[in-house]
Image (tube, coloured by chain):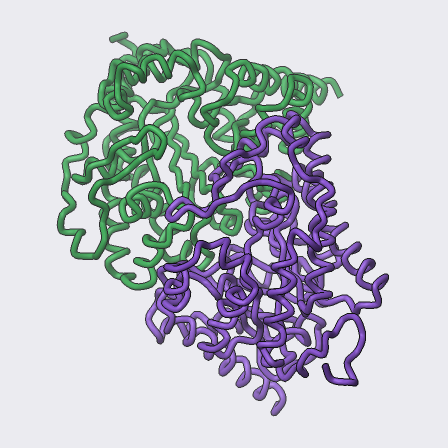
Chain colours: A green, B purple
Amino acid sequence: MSSENANLNNYGFPTLKNDLILRAAKGESVDRVPVWIMRQAGRYLPEFREIRTKQSFFELCQNPQLACEVTLMPIDRYDLDAAIIFSDILVVPQALGMIVEMLPTKGPSFPAPLVVPADLEKLNKNCDVKKELKYVFDAITITRHALNGKVPLIGFSGAPWTLMSYMIEGGGSNTQSKAKAWLYKYPEESHELLKILTNVIIDYLVEQVVAGAQLLQVFESHAGSLDNQLFTKFALPYIRVISKLVREKLRERNVEPVPMIIFAKDGHFVLEELSQSHYEVVGLDWTIKPKQARQIVGESITLQGNFDPCALYANRDDLVKLTRDMLQKFGYKNYIANLGHGIYPDMEPESVKIFVDAVHKISQEMIQNDANK
Amino acid sequence: MSSENANLNNYGFPTLKNDLILRAAKGESVDRVPVWIMRQAGRYLPEFREIRTKQSFFELCQNPQLACEVTLMPIDRYDLDAAIIFSDILVVPQALGMIVEMLPTKGPSFPAPLVVPADLEKLNKNCDVKKELKYVFDAITITRHALNGKVPLIGFSGAPWTLMSYMIEGGGSNTQSKAKAWLYKYPEESHELLKILTNVIIDYLVEQVVAGAQLLQVFESHAGSLDNQLFTKFALPYIRVISKLVREKLRERNVEPVPMIIFAKDGHFVLEELSQSHYEVVGLDWTIKPKQARQIVGESITLQGNFDPCALYANRDDLVKLTRDMLQKFGYKNYIANLGHGIYPDMEPESVKIFVDAVHKISQEMIQNDANK
C-alpha cells in the first residue's frame, strides 16, 4: 500500500493513468472520446470461450481471480477506456437465496421462480450483502490492483424492476407478461419485492465502490416491457432512491461517491425522467436519435451509447463511417461512446478494434479541429 | 348476389351494419370509439384451443372454412367493431417456397432459413400469389359473407423487413442479429430480398381487398431491432411503396381502395415518417405516449392502440380505470382502440369483454358530454 493513499476509499490502489471516462461522466473536457463496450468481456472473445470450457458461467463470477482475469481480457486486446467487472446482474437474486443457472443456449434459468406473492417468504430478505457477494467485492479489489491504473473499473447492478422480472419469469422472456401481471394484480406485493431488491442493490453498489469500483452502471434492461405509467410507478422511484442512497451511504462512510450511469434499454419514453434522476450519465439504446436525446436530457447530462451492435458486422470502411456518423451526432462533449446494447457472441474481435480505434481517432480530430478554429 | 352490388369489389356482400372502424380510419365522426384486438382469434379463447387440438396452426390457416370459423369466434363472444381474418404473416414466405412450421412452445420455425445471399435463388420469386395464397382469399370471401355485415373484415400482411428477418433468423429472435448482419454485410442482396417480398405483399394485399377485405393492416413487428438509419434505408421505402401501389393496383382494377393501417412495433423513432407514408391509420405499441404521438403525427392521421396487453390482467375496476385513462388521452376523434400488441395466450376471456365494453361505454359518454356542451 502506497503511503499517500490511505483513506477508506482507497486500498492503496495504483494511480489512475487514464481518467477520460470519469472526466466525460463529470462533464469535464477530454482530448478524445472515451469508449467501452457492454459485455466487452464475453463470448465473442476466443480467450473467454476457452476459459468457459473449464468453468461454468457462475463459477467464473464467483472466483475473484478468474473474474479478474476475464475482466482484463478485452483491456489487454483493445485500447478501451474502462474495464467493467466480470459478473452478472443475477448475482443479486442469488444473494437473496434464489437458484440461477446459466444454460448453454437458453441463457439464465431459475428452477424455482417466484409464482405468487407468498413466494416472497422464501427470499432471504435480510441477506448480508457483504458476505453473500463478497466474491464480487474481492474480484473488484483484485482487478483494480491488476489494472495498475490503466483505466477505471466499472461496477454494476441490475435495476429492481429488471431483477424482479427475471425472478418471476424464471429466465428471459419476450413479453415479461408474468412479471407484469404481478404489477397489475399484486401492486403492493410488487412494491414489497422491489423494495427488498432496492435495499440489496444499494448495499451492493456501495460495497462495490468501497472495494474499488470507480464508476457504477445500473441496468434497467427491461424498461421497454413497461409503459410510462408502470415505469413511473414501479421502476423510476427505485432507480432514483438508488442513486440518492448510494451517494449518501458512501459519504457516511467517508468514501467519495463515484459517477453513476443509468441505462434503461428501450426506455425512450422516460429519457427525460431518467436525466432528472441524479445519474451523471444516461445510457441510450440504438433506437434513440442522438440529437433528440440531447434535447431531451439537456446539456449537463453525459450521454452514453448507442452504436448498433450489429453495425460491427459491417466491413471496415462502413464501420468507420458509421462510427464517424455517431460521433458527429453526439459531439465530443459530455459523451461516452459505447454500443446501444451488449456485444453479440458471434462478433469478430477485429471489429471491436476498428470501432474503438475509430472512436479515438475521429474524436481526437474533431477536438483538434475545433481547437484550431 | 344482390343486383345493386355488381362491381368487382363486391361479390354481393351483405350490407355493412357497423362501419365505425372505417369511419374512424377515414377521420369521420363516430358515436363511440371502435375497438378490435390484435390476435383476437387466438389461444386465449377456449374454443380456439379446442379446434387446435384437431388441426395444426397452418392447417387452420389453409382451410378457408375453418379459418372463417376461427375468425368469427371473438365476434360471437364480444361486441368488437372489426373481424381480422385468421391467418399468419408467415404465409408469404411459404408462398415464396419456404417451409414454416409452428412448434408448440417455440413458435414459428423455418427448417431451412436463408443463410447466405445465394439462398435467394431457392425462393420462388415469381410465385403466383393468387394461386399460392388462394386459401386466404377464399377464407376472406367466405368470412365476409358469414359476417353478414355485422362488422368490417380486416386483411393483413407482414411488412418486408419483418418477413425478411424471420426468413433469415428461422424463427423468433431477441436481437434479429443474423438478419441485421445481412443489412450491413449484403445491402444489395438485402434490397433484392426486400423487393421480392414487397412485390408479393402488394399482390397479396390487393387480392385480399378484391376477395372482400375492408381494411388492411401491415405489421412491421420488428421495427425496434432497427435504428433510424436502417429503418430509413431498409424498411420505410418498402412500407411506402406498398401503400402507394396497393391503391394504384386496386384502382386499375376498378376496386375502391380501403383504408390502411401501419403498425411498426417499437418504432417510436419513426412515427413521424410513418404518418407521412399514406396510411390512414398508424398503430402504436404501449410504450408510446398518446398525446406525444398525436403531436408527432398531426391531426389528420387516425391513431390505433395502445393498451398494455398486460393491463388485461388487472381486476375489473382497475381495467375500466385504465381504459378510461387511455380514452381520455387519445380522445375519440381519429382513434381506434386496440391493444399495443397481440393479446397473450393466458388472458382471461372475460377481461376482453370488460375492455371492449368499457371502450364503448366510456367513449359514448365522452361524445355525448361534448355534444351537450
Seen from the viewer's position, the closer of residues B272 and A272 is B272
Residue A64 seen by the camera = yes
Q: Residue at x 61, y 60 (%)?
A: B136
Image-quadrant location for residue A43? top left
Q: Position of residue B234 (x, y in %)?
A: 69, 39
Give the x, y percent position of residue A76: 43, 9
Q: Is residue A22 visible?
A: no
Decide which of B31, B40 is in the foreground and name it: B40
Q: Is residue A80 left or right of residue A331?
A: left
Residue at x 60%, y 60% (from the top left corner):
B283
Q: Quadrant of the C terminus of chain B?
A: bottom right
Relative image position of residue B20 (x, y in whole percent): 63, 78
Query: Would you identify the image quadrant in which residue B137 lies?
Result: bottom right
B270 sits left or right of B285 in the view: right
**Quadrant holding the N terminus of chain B:** bottom right
The reply, left or right, for residue B73 in relation to residue A123 is right
| In the rendered image, the vertical position of residue B219 relative to residue A128, given as above or below | below
Q: Position of residue B54 (x, y in %)?
A: 39, 60
Q: Residue at x 60, y 81 (%)?
A: B148
- State the image quarter where residue A152 is shown: top left
Q: How many marks?
A: 0
Q: Residue at x 60, y 20 (%)?
A: A359
Task: Tell me if residue B284 comes above or below residue A364 in the rendering.
Answer: below
- Residue positioned most to the bottom: B372
